[in-house]
Structure formats: structure tokens, C-alpha cells
Amino acid sequence: MPDSTPLRLLIIGAHPDDAEGRCGGLMTIYRQAGHVVKWISVTNGDAGHHLISGPELAKIRDQESASATAVIGAEYEIWDAHDGQLEPTLEMRWQVIRAIRTFKPDLVLTHRNCDYHPDHRAVAQLVQDASFSVTVPAIVPDTPALSKDPVVAYMADTFTRPTPLRADICMNVDDYRDTINEMFSCHVSQAFEWLPFNRGVADTVPAEEEERNKWLLESFMPHLYGDVADAFRKELIANYGEDIGKDVKFAEVYEISEYACPLDDEKRERFFWFLPD
Ligand SMILES: [Zn+2]
């Protein structure tokens, strides 16, 4: 009998839009199959804007996160570390250990520790430091230890130094791009304000909502999911065949961490049942 227990997916990111910006397809597929999806943002995102900051921005980002996760019925939790100031301290490691032990995920997604953003690198370090430790009862004894590590996977980036991401899992998520776009569009302060401002394209964002969402899908999301598709085109073609693989517009790629539970064949089939053989 195949195991019908719902899977538990936990995304540990640095900022409140990291999950929707990097793994919206997998989140959607899991929710549609009745699995449990939650993301944690270790910082409250209070530096992610050019006009507002501090508690006012943190509150806005919390409201945006509620809207984004409601699109697919995911859970979220925002911690109170300041955006841009995260350090992989021992206290923060304990908090990550408690969170993993409490949620009991089958699969954890997080950042790699070669990444442009210091908060992303800090989260990567925290999750790596929590791996194995989650199974050690004498570490953080106030929260019962797990009997084994979850599988940990790194969300895609296109950085190459010191090493590019290894495409252990390579997904065409074109069928989910409208949902991904709808989720990301809820992060208004990011999708339509801060990120376009930071990239010097704020004047190209339409004012009207429908036009704005179309702009997001066609002009901005390609920088998130499209760049991944282009960087891993060879792997997409290997997985989906030339005809489909060459035309994939939105992709998600994951590397399995060697510091936690390996992804054996049984887990691969159970966690990624929707992939071609
Ligand atoms: Zn981020």
C-alpha cells in the first residue's frame, strides 16, 4: 500500500517573499494534492522598500504574506529578526531546530550558502547547522528530538561561484505560472514597488491592477523562474524531452543537501511523484 499520509513541506527562507519567488510551483502542486505547506521567513522584511521601513513595513509584509499563502491554503510564520541584519547565531540555530522539530517536515527547502544576499546565506547556514542537531536530544532539550532528519533541498539560484546548483530535481512549472504569479502579486510592496525600483524599471509598472499583474507575469517573473529555466535548459530537455524541455518558460530546480537525509528512490517517488521517469 502506498503511504497516504499527507506530506509536510517546510520552506525556511530569509524574507517574506522568498517562498513564492522561488518555489511557488512545488507549493501549489503539494497543496493541490492535499499536502501540508508552510513557510517561515526568518526576518520580517523590514528593510525591503525604498520609501517605508521598520515596523510599518513589517506589518505590510505580514498582510501581504497572509494574502499570498491564502491563494493556495499554505501556512506561514514570520520571525522578528531585522531584514539585512541576520546572523547565524546559536540562539537563532536553536529557534530553527525547534521549528523543524515542531513542524516535523518530510522535506525542507532553503537557500544555498553561496548567494548574493547575506540573509539568505545566514539562513542556509542556520538550516545546515540545524541538520543532524534536530536528532540530538541533548541539544535544545525543551523540544523533543526527531528520530531522523528531514530531506533538505536548496532552492534554485543561478550563481556559479564556488559551484553552480546541482539539478537533482528539475521541474517544469509552466502549468502553475498563473497561480505563482497570483501569489507573488500579493507581495505588492515587493512585486510592484521595491523590486522594480531597485532594478531601475519602476516606470514600466502599469497602474491598473489587471495590467500590472500581466506585467508581472510577462516582464518580471521571467527574472525569477525564467532565468532558472534558461540556466538549466539542458537538464529540462533531459527530463522532459527536446520538444517540451526547449520551450519551458518557468522552472524550479532543487539540489538535495548532503548534510541531511538522502533522497532515496522511495522518497523521490513519494515527494516528486509528478515528475517524468
Ligand atoms: Zn530573500
Image (cartoon, rainbow, N blue to C red):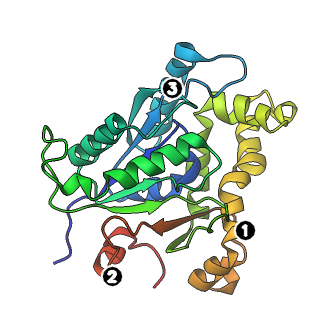
Label 1 – label 2 distance at C-alpha: 27 Å
Q: Amino acid at mark 2?
A: Asp
**Disc 3 + disc 1, Cβ < 8 Å:** no
Residue pictured at 71% horizontal, 30% vertical: 194
The x, y position of residue 223, in whole percent, is 73, 52
When asked about the image quadrant of residue 77, the answer is top left
Q: Amino acid at mark 1?
A: Asp
Pick the quarter of the image with the C terminus: bottom left
The x, y position of residue 204, in whole percent, is 86, 36
The x, y position of residue 87, in whole percent, is 47, 37
Viewer can see residue 31: no
Q: Which mark is first along the chain, 2 or 1?
A: 1
Residue pictured at 40% horizontal, 47% vertical: 126
In this view, the residue in front, 214 or 97, is: 97
Q: Mark 1 CB in 8 Å range of ligand 1?
A: no
In this view, the residue in front, 83 or 206, is: 83
Report which residue position mark 2 lands on: 265
In this view, the residue in front, 89 or 20, is: 89
Report which residue position mark 3 lands on: 82
